[in-house]
Image (spheres, rainbow, N blue to C red):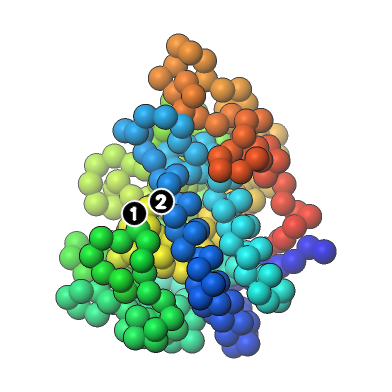
Amino acid sequence: MVYVRKNVSKLTRTERRRFVEALLELKRRGEYDEFVRVHIAHFTGDGDRGLRVAHTTPSFFPWHRKFTLDLENALRRIDSSVTVPYWDWTRDRKTTSLPWTDDLLGGNGRPGDRRVMTGPFAYGTGNWTIGTGVTEADYLTRDLGRSRGPIDLPTKADLNHALADPVYDVAPWNSTVSRGFRNKLEGWGRGSGQDSWRCHNRVHRWVGGAMVGGGSVNDPVFWLHHAFVDLQWSRWQKRHRNHRYLPAKPPGPDSDQYRRTVARHERLPPWDVTPDELDDVSKIYRYV
């Protein structure tokens, strides 16, 4: 049966509570931290040799689709009514609006150490100790909007700029490309500050704290953010029905991307699944 992923602003109080309780139970069981470890293990950039599957690469969308599905399935084993909601950061843009309420994700970090003090994921509750992918603190941190060098969340216009590009991705299939839907939404740009972080990337920077870097999964907002990113991929697919995931074939030995980029029908580590197999999820879930 196809289930529904809802806008976080449309969740009932009961749905919010059940989503939070399922996340906390997954954390208590020790399963949540494994998701953090998987993301860190696959957080590779252009400067790293070897295969890139999660970031700065065409498989950014299918990799995170599968990753979020795995988390969602784990939550639904705890509570079958739970699905991952999405956060529309083009509409809910205030640091006090959803999802930053005390009954959902809690609020901003306090001045100084940026420690989150409110909500169910605050360190003081004893339910959300961070032990994976951090170097300084075992508590959740946020710096919404960046207190030093403030930045804004992406706008609807930013999103539409990405959605309008009919080509999925282009060579050299990394962070340097200026054409193609994938990097326009993933958000690697040139320059500094807001110019270098667009769309998906800028949201990570805007949240700050734990959301910056490979350990970003430590903040549960990661899932709401990536559900919204996944929704945009679905919208792009519907808008450009004659265009699909690229590259269709792997780059050859004469390319500097040889064995560094996953083609449409190649396995997507760490799973035994291909981008092509993740192209259509309409029989699993839909967005409302």
Q: Provide the secondary structure element on which disc 2 rests.
A: helix
Residue that numbered label 1 is attached to: 213
Vertical arrangement, residue 212 with respect to residue 86, above or below: above
Vertical arrangement, residue 268 with respect to residue 213, above or below: above
Residue that numbered label 2 is attached to: 40
- Which amino acid, mark 2? Ile
Circle 2: is it few (<14), some (14-19), or many (20+) Cα within 10 Å?
A: some
Vertical arrangement, residue 117 with respect to residue 165, above or below: below
> With 17 as the anchor, is 95 left or right in this view?
left
Dividing the picture into quarters, in which one does residue 287 lie? Answer: bottom right
Q: Outermost residue toward the right?
A: 1
Viewer-closest of 124 and 13: 124
Viewer-closest of 17 and 152: 17
Q: x and y percent of residue 76 in the render?
A: 68, 70
Residue drawn where x is 61% and y is 43% of the image: 271
Q: Is residue 184 visible?
A: no
Q: Is residue 257 visible?
A: yes
Quadrant holding the C terminus: bottom right
Mark 2 and mark 1: span between their CA atoms? 8 Å
Residue drawn where x is 54% and y is 72% of the image: 29
